[in-house]
Structures are given as structure tokens and as C-alpha cells.
Amino acid sequence: MRSDDLEALALLHDPVRRSLYAAVVAGGGDVGRGEAAEAAGVSRTLAGHHLDKLVEAGLLESGFRQQERKGPGSGRPAKIYRRAGGERSVSLPPRDYTTLASVLADVVAELGAEERAERAARAAGAGIAARNAGEPVGRVLDGSGYEPYAEDGVLRLRNCPFHVIAEEQPLLVCSMNLALCQGLLEGLGEDPGRAALDPRPGECCVVLKAHGSGTGKVGPSKANDS
């Protein structure tokens, strides 16, 4: 655990800062000061103060939105905020599960055991479903860190809980992630074919399509269907 991680996350103990951070995250992109203030129910001035504190801590990034009008009278560029790309974690005492996960992913790839990994991931998804029986799939995914949101009849996942390892082993991790989501759906009594790979920059590679929309773009190996 790094002290700067602890200090950064401690800022979110303040309910206003936590609400503003959540508003920026929920925006899914560049969120203006006024938008964040309205979502959090505070003034623009107070929102700006707290948003800039979150930027200083590395939890958010800031920039300026390009003005449609140019030249005199166009006004000042609007300041916008987005979630920072880095990760923060706190554990007491310090633990390092990411390094072990990276090593295990390398071993799976070296042994060519991708199909077995997908089967294990599907079983893990079923296990999550068993622990959350009766809950809507969106709520279960949210509780697992995926940050689901609806868009055009599709449930997209704003966050990849396995982002660090996915950057090292994208094919393996995405196929396992898909298998996990299929196992979760099946365990909750839903069609596992709703889960499909549809990568989008900055988001999870898996999406959940509407009920009855069939199989996805790409699925895990056929071994997972047995």
C-alpha cells in the first residue's frame, strides 16, 4: 500500500467529493463542472473546488472542451473532467495479487491451456450467480466492479475489473471474461448467449445484448458449451 493511494482514496470519504467523482464516472467521458455540480446537488463554485482537489490527487483528469465558436466573443473554453486512467488500491497489510495473476496468465498462455481457463472462468461466473441468486444481472455486475450502463438496448460495462492483466494478455483475459459473464448469466437463469465481445476503448470488452438477441460476435471455444 502506497501512502499516496491512501491519501487519494481518503478524499472520497467526503460525501460531496464522492458524489462528484461518481457523477464524472457515470458520465463515461468528459463531464463539465456544471453537469457534475447538478448531479451532486451543489453549486458550480463548490463543485469546481472539490473536482480540482480530485485532479490533484490523481483520481480525475481535467482538460478543456473545444468551443464551437472561435474568435472574439466565443468565451472561455469550458473545463471538463474525466476519470484518471491509473488505479488506486489499499490493503492492510499490503498484498500484491496482480503480480500473481500476471504470472498465472503467462503460464496458461505458455501451456496452451486457454480452453481449460475458459471453463474455469465459466464455473467462476456460475459461482458468483449462486452467491447472488435472485438478483438482477446488472446489480450483480455492478457489485463485481463492471459498472454496467444501458446504451441502445445493450448493457455495456464501463470498467474492466481485470484491466492490468488484460493489457498483458488481452486475448486470454477477454475470452475468460466472456466465459465468466456467460457462466454468470446461465447461473442466474438467463441466456448465456446475451454476452458477447464488443471491445470499446477504455471499457470492458464484454457487452450484454437484449433478451432474445441470439449469440454474440465472438464466443469462447466450443469446449465451454459442453
Image (cartoon, helix red, strand yellow):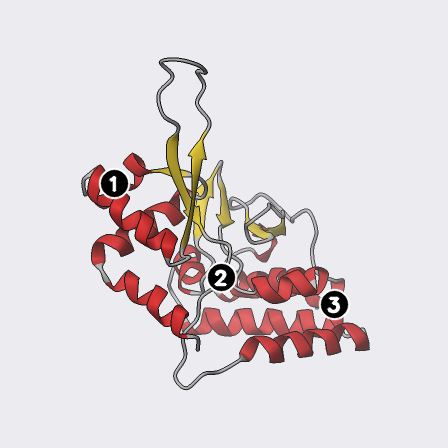
Identify the residue under disc 1.
37
What is the crowding at mark 1: few (fewer than 14 residues within 10 Å), some, or many (at least 20)? many
Left or right of 91 on screen, residue 52: left
Q: Which mark is residue 49?
A: none
Amino acid type indicated by mark 1 = Ala
- Which residue, as the protein is rendered here, is positioned at the far bottom? 93
Image location (x, y in percent) of residue 126: 53, 71
What's the residue type where badge 3 is placed?
A: Ala
Q: Nearer the viewer, mark 3 or mark 1?
A: 1
Question: Residue 189 got which mark?
Answer: 2
Asked whether the residues under the numbered discs 3 and 1 touch, taking CB atoms below 8 Å apart as contact, a structural biologist would say no
Residue receiving disc 3: 223
Q: Is residue 25 left or right of residue 37?
A: right
| Label 3 vs label 2, nearer the camera | 3
Q: SS of the residue at dot 1?
A: helix
Q: Residues within 10 Å of mark 2 (few under 14, many from 20)?
A: few
Task: Return the disc, 3 or 2, that comes first in the chain's sequence.
Answer: 2
